[in-house]
Image: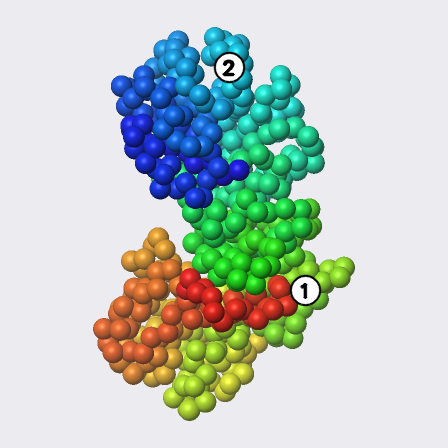
Amino acid sequence: MICLTLAERTLEDAASCVKKNREYIDLCELRLDYLDDKEQKRASLFPQMVDLPVILTFRRIQDGGKCSISEKGRRSLMFQALDGSFSYVDIEEDVKRSEVEEKARSKGIRIIRSLHDFERVPEDIFSRLYHLAEKGDIAKVAVTPRSFQDVLTLFRVEEELKGVEKIVIGMGDYGVCTRILYKRLGSMLTFVSANEVAPGQISAEKMKIEYRADQVNERTAIYGIIGNPVMHSASPVLHNRGFKAINFNAIYVPFLVDNVRSFFMFAEYVKMRGFSVTVPFKVDVLSYLGNITREVKQIGSCNTVVRVPGMWKGINTDYYGFIKPIMTDIDSGRIKNALVIGAGGASHAIVWALRNYGVKVTILNRTLSRAEDIARLNVCDFDRIENANKYSGKVDLIVQTTSVGLFPDVDQNPIEGFRFSGKEIVYDIIYKPRMTKLLKEAQKAGCILHYGSEMLLEQGKLQFEAFTGYHYPHWVDSGL
């Protein structure tokens, strides 16, 4: 089930929010702690204002809520609200048996017994869940993974506590994948909201339409993208729309990762079929691959991993994705030399692609040794990024491969003050925002622009084919 958390000031606003999201949700949670004082006293009326089951919750400050009144006052308002036809009531782990619980049981209102931890994933989470469920209640844990190893622990809950009715939530960016893949955690529902009431919540429409999370079953193939950061990625939109268009039972999820080894353990545990790789892991994943393509071997960087019998295979689609939008200019001789900014994983592929087509390349980077490593492999020049203006008016193509200028740091430019002649073709592989500060300055000078979304779309189509065996459906709006 997909549950909409309501953090409105009035019952009418809450009902309106339900109506707006009705096609995407199965139930809702009324948060008394967000309601105005007068509205809290009317809360019993709310279940009759909507046409779906309602969870009653009155969350204390220490549990991530806004309720600051006395515990006696809080329980009194909850007791009063239970005159309404709520389907569930959320009662915290440490609250002893009270009149609220007794009234709920007498009315057949199911009790969700909840534990919240905004600091960590408790080491004894399995036993805590078991004890929460001992009285036949629904056990709920909302905890905060601080590493990808913590995420793996949450996915193990279903194996450890099979048959226990539960709600398992990882909060924050690490936990976003647990919200989307909630069924794989054995969780009876996932929470969504219009305004991120809890860290990591996403919208109802996104959960239902983009991810189709409620349709995940044991046969659903899991794909995703790993990176740090990764939540800005547009790849989930592209791939999930493609899966839906060809009726392919699969889901593509963003995974914030801090340790590649932990992720490969997770990938084996949930039997992932493949995943995309973005910064900073395009080189790190190589140690875990049993087979690599010629491009990966030559470039030394991998952006796509697929499962093949007995091993993981590494592919690089950045090469083809990057080069396709500028091939006409290369073939015509318009592009003969290029300045490549950055020496990360994407730079490896881009430099190799340009050199393969005879373009003379100079790599600029803050850490000179990293630029030198790529330059030696590809027989090209290198220099410090501080010397960028030496090349003003001397290159046909400028390619920006770093994360400088990526949302939310949109006011940054890796070659601040560069003097564009207006004759350059400028290509920034960042796609969010579409118009980076670098591209804006290049546009003012009259340069031809290429956008990161072009590369993302082309390389993403190739990834889709590697994942599914099908061409990306041409009739689908990729969202890029």
Residue 369: percent from left, percent from top: 50, 67
**The one of 384 and 176 positioned closer to us in this rendering:** 176
Query: Farthest residue toward the left?
Result: 444
Disc 1 marks a residue whose amino acid type is Lys
Q: For the residue labelled by badge 2, is the local secondary structure a helix, a strand or a loop?
A: loop
- Where residue 435 sits, quadrant-wise, is bottom left
Residue 84: percent from left, percent from top: 41, 19
- In the drawing, does residue 110 fall left or right of residue 440? right
Q: In which quarter of the image is the C terminus?
A: bottom left
- In the drawing, does residue 25 fall left or right of residue 268? left
Q: Identify the residue shown where x is 34% and y is 54%.
A: 409
Disc 2 marks a residue whose amino acid type is Lys
Q: Say if 21 sits above or below 291 in the image.
A: above
Q: Identify the residue shown where x is 68% and y is 60%.
A: 307
Q: Say if 412 sits above or below 110 in the image.
A: below
Residue 313's tag is 1
Residue 1: percent from left, percent from top: 53, 37
Residue 397 can be seen in this image:
yes
**The one of 359 and 444 positioned closer to us in this rendering:** 444
Q: How crowded is mark 2: few (under 14 residues within 10 Å), some or many (20 or more)?
A: some
- In the drawing, does residue 211 fall left or right of residue 339? right
Q: Which of marks 1 and 2 is in front?
A: 2
Asked if marks 1 and 2 touch (Cβ < 8 Å), the reply is: no
In three-dimensional space, the C-alpha distance between marks 1 and 2, rounded to whole angstroms, equals 56 Å
Q: Say if 329 sits above or below 135 in the image.
A: below
Q: Circle 2 sits on which residue?
A: 107
Q: For the residue labelled by badge 1, is the local secondary structure a helix, a strand or a loop?
A: strand
Q: Sequence-wise, which precedes: disc 1 or disc 2? A: 2
Q: Identify the residue shown where x is 67% and y is 68%.
A: 292
- Where residue 436 sits, quadrant-wise, is bottom left
- In the drawing, does residue 452 fall left or right of residue 101? left
Residue 74 can be seen in this image:
no
